[in-house]
Image (cartoon, rainbow, N blue to C red):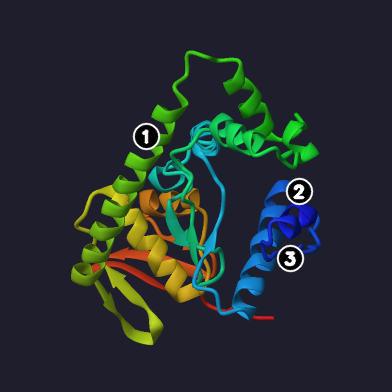
Amino acid sequence: MAAVCAARGVPHQILAVEVAPGNVQAEARRARYAALAAWAGERALGALATAHHADDQAETLLLRLNRGSGAAGLAGVRAHGLVPGTRLPLLRPLLDWRRAELAGIVAEAGLAAADDPSNHDPRFDRVRVRQALAGADWLDVPALARSAAFLAEADAALDWAAAREWGENVKPGPLGSYVYRPQAPRAVALRVIGRLVAGMEGDSVRGSQVARAFDALVAGQPASLGNLVARPGPDGWTFMPAPRRKA
């Protein structure tokens, strides 16, 4: 790739990364974005663009359907977003293109596309989904990608509703606590609780944990969320730091 760029006068740089142990593909993704964000920051660039396409979007939707994801997960990758862990805009201008269309453009230019061996390794869930899609010609990949885009719109609407619910029904309480008097449907209330936890903890918790806490509170029972405890009461649900354990 360096030779291709050099021959065409395209400025380029190859970034080396170290992948942490664990989920190889997830950690590699994290390392790539961290390296690209640092590189862009050093040059005061305004955004980072990636080549995610419609087939990537369809694969992501099917993967997350299989994991029981909610609207936020099923929305897949977005055309506009932020590089994970940064405020750097992330653009994906090729989401309407198929993989084969892009490969055809590369081939017509007389170039050989880079081929990552991990893209053919069936140990990875995404590879197995990709192989299944390739053998299911009755599936409409562009339609799957459009569904993800529609779900992204629904996800944005839920965020809007959650922000309104927060403004109207979340109030600060004593000793760093918050009181939430839920008035919205469950899907919106879950987002409000997630936002409460993120604001008080400085970190997010899994959606399944938030859902269990919501169900417990509706049933009139206390719930734990990370280092927080939530208790139902006559004025709403009170979220506060859990008492410190005595040594």
Q: Nearest to the eye among marks 1 and 3: give it.
A: 3
Numbered disc 3: secondary structure: loop
Q: Residues within 10 Å of mark 3 (few under 14, many from 20)?
A: few
Q: Residue at x 56, y 79 (%)?
A: 44
The image quarter in which residue 71 lies = top left
Circle 1 sits on which residue? Answer: 147
Mark on residue 220? none
Foreground: 13 or 89?
13
Marks 2 and 1 sit apart, C-alpha to C-alpha, by 28 Å
- The disc, 2 or 1, on the residue closer to the chain's N-terminal end is 2
Q: Residue at x 38, y 56 (%)?
A: 221
Relative to 20, residue 235 above or below: below
The image quarter in which residue 176 lies = bottom left
- The disc, 3 or 2, on the residue closer to the chain's N-terminal end is 3
Q: Position of residue 25 (x, y in %)?
A: 71, 47
Numbered disc 1: secondary structure: helix
